Image (cartoon, helix red, strand yellow):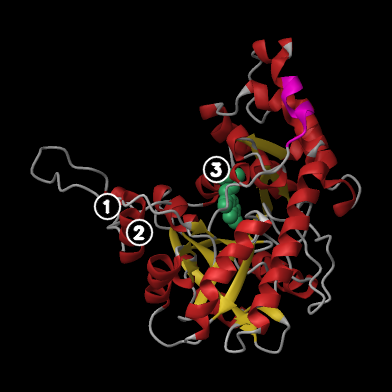
């Protein structure tokens, strides 16, 4: 989210809700970027994560269903059109045991973000808590604030010996209080690219079942497994959809699965002990019915869009792999910098020598190199010294960014 400044309207008669009292003053990095843009100076943007801006070729077939007569019919269905839910169930296909994901245990939403909102509404009263990973996706804080939910963090720790990121279960247990209602997992996580392992999944199921917590699992990057040879990870990651060990709400959507964020279609898959899952579904149906937010055209088009995902994902995966190799080649000449292991997703993390703040480094990257990267603190890294690079930018742009950054990194 871009930084924005809130006005001081306290003397003007309206009292805004406390949950909107965000302190969002623009930071030095945003100011420097704005100044550069105002001066008409270009920048190599290595934070770009909007897939519609990176030159992918979208199959023309995607547009056909949007022009069909079916989009002119309105048959409201709180949980979404059956044909669209069936297409989502098929998407899970071989990733889950047969019949583990059924259309009647699914709610369509406008986005994964709306899925989070519905899940928090289902599980939490005001002031209740959910656990989220750190580092992770920055929007989680806003999603929680808007539902009056309090976030508590558990740590993902990176093993320097190449085993990648793991959940620190001591911090999970320490974060749980009487008000905790759910554990959020981002599988694979943004930006660490780490997936929840089979052993971690078992332990999470045990904790959740024992303490009466739900698992809310964000799987928007599930299809982007990279099989990092250092980790020996499987490229095809196992979904939590259909997880039976605890009440589980699995979230995803077209935004990343088909690289179509503008279509606004997401979903929630509910699983777990049968009675709990049925009860959760009945309640979610009322929440969804209150808004009936998902548009008909995208639901009509969902089977075709999901059916075309392979053609889109192949382009993106190839690019991510090429950029990752390019990054490794560039870092080979910069021994003080280290690219952390990545199992999946669209991002790479580079550990840089921890001298001076990473914010300062990102500012200098813009001013001196004309390159924009995310400092790690944007994603709530516990320590300084990390830069996050998007791997979905076109290969030539990525290479240019690396070439421009190299002298500054070499000088650290
Ligand atoms: C981990 C994660 N979850 C959810 C989203 C948003 O998904 P949607 O567009 O479906 O709301 C993003 C977007 O970048 C993300 O990184």
Which residue is labeled 2 in the image? 30
Residue 118 has which mark? 3
Q: Position of residue 272 (x, y in %)?
A: 74, 53
What is the secondary structure assignment of the residue under circle 1?
loop
The residue positioned 53% from the left and 60% from the top of the image is: 137
Place residue 378 in its image quadrant: bottom left
Q: In the shown orientation, is residue 359 left or right of residue 94?
A: left
Pick the front one: 150 or 351:
351
Which residue is labeled 1 in the image? 21
How busy is the neighbourhood of tag 2: few (under 14 within 10 Å), some, or many (20 plus)?
Answer: some
Say which of marks 2 and 1 sits in front.
Answer: 2
- Which comes before the other along the chain, label 3 or label 1? 1
The residue positioned 60% from the left and 80% from the top of the image is: 157
Q: CA distance from mark 3 to mark 2?
A: 32 Å
**Magenta-tinted stretch:** 58-65
The residue positioned 55% from the left and 54% from the top of the image is: 48
Residue 272 visible to the viewer: no
Does ligand 1 reach within 8 Å of label 3's beta carbon?
Answer: no
Q: Position of residue 67 (x, y in %)?
A: 71, 15
Q: CA distance from mark 3 to mark 1?
A: 22 Å
> Does the magenta stretch mainly form a helix, a strand or a loop?
helix
The answer to if 69 sits in the magenta stretch is no
Say if 273 sits above or below 398 in the image.
above
Q: Position of residue 177 (x, y in %)?
A: 48, 71
């Amino acid at each position: 989210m871009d930084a924005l400044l809130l006005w001081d309207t306290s003397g003007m008669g309206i009292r805004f809700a406390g949950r909107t009292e965000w302190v969002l003053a623009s930071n030095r990095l945003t100011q420097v970027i704005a100044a550069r843009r105002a001066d008409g100076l270009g920048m190599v943007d290595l934070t770009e994560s909007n897939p519609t801006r990176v030159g992918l070729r979208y199959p023309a077939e995607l547009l056909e269903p949007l022009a069909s007569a079916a989009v002119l019919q309105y048959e409201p269905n709180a949980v979404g059109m059956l044909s669209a839910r069936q297409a989502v169930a098929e998407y899970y296909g071989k990733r889950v045991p047969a019949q583990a994901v059924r259309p009647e245990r699914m709610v369509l939403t406008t986005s994964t973000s709306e899925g989070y909102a519905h899940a928090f509404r289902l599980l939490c009263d005001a002031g209740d808590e959910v656990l989220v990973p750190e580092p992770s996706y920055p929007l989680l804080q806003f999603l929680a604030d808007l539902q009056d939910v309090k976030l508590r963090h558990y740590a993902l720790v990176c093993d320097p010996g190449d085993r990648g990121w793991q959940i620190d279960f001591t911090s999970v247990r320490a974060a749980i209080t009487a008000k905790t209602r759910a554990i959020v997992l981002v599988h694979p996580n943004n930006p660490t690219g780490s997936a929840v392992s089979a052993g971690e999944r078992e332990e999470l199921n045990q904790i959740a079942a024992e303490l009466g917590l739900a698992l809310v699992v964000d799987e928007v990057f599930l299809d982007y497994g990279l099989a990092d040879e250092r980790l020996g990870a499987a490229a095809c990651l196992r979904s939590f959809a259909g997880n039976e060990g605890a009440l589980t709400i699995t979230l995803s959507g077209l935004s990343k699965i088909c690289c179509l964020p503008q279509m606004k279609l997401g979903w929630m898959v509910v699983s777990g002990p049968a009675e709990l899952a049925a009860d959760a579904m009945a309640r979610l149906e009322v929440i969804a019915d209150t808004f009936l937010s998902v548009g008909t055209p995208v639901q009509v088009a969902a089977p075709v869009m999901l059916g075309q995902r392979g053609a889109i994902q192949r382009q993106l995966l190839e690019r991510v792999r090429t950029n990752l190799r390019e990054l490794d080649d560039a870092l080979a000449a910069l021994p003080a910098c280290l690219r952390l292991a990545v199992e999946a997703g669209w991002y790479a993390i580079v550990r840089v020598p921890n001298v001076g703040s990473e914010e300062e480094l990102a500012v200098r990257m813009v001013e001196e190199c004309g390159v924009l990267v995310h400092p790690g603190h944007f994603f709530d890294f516990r320590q300084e010294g990390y830069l996050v690079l998007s791997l979905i930018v076109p290969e030539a742009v990525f290479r240019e960014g690396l070439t421009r950054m190299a002298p500054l990194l070499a000088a650290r």
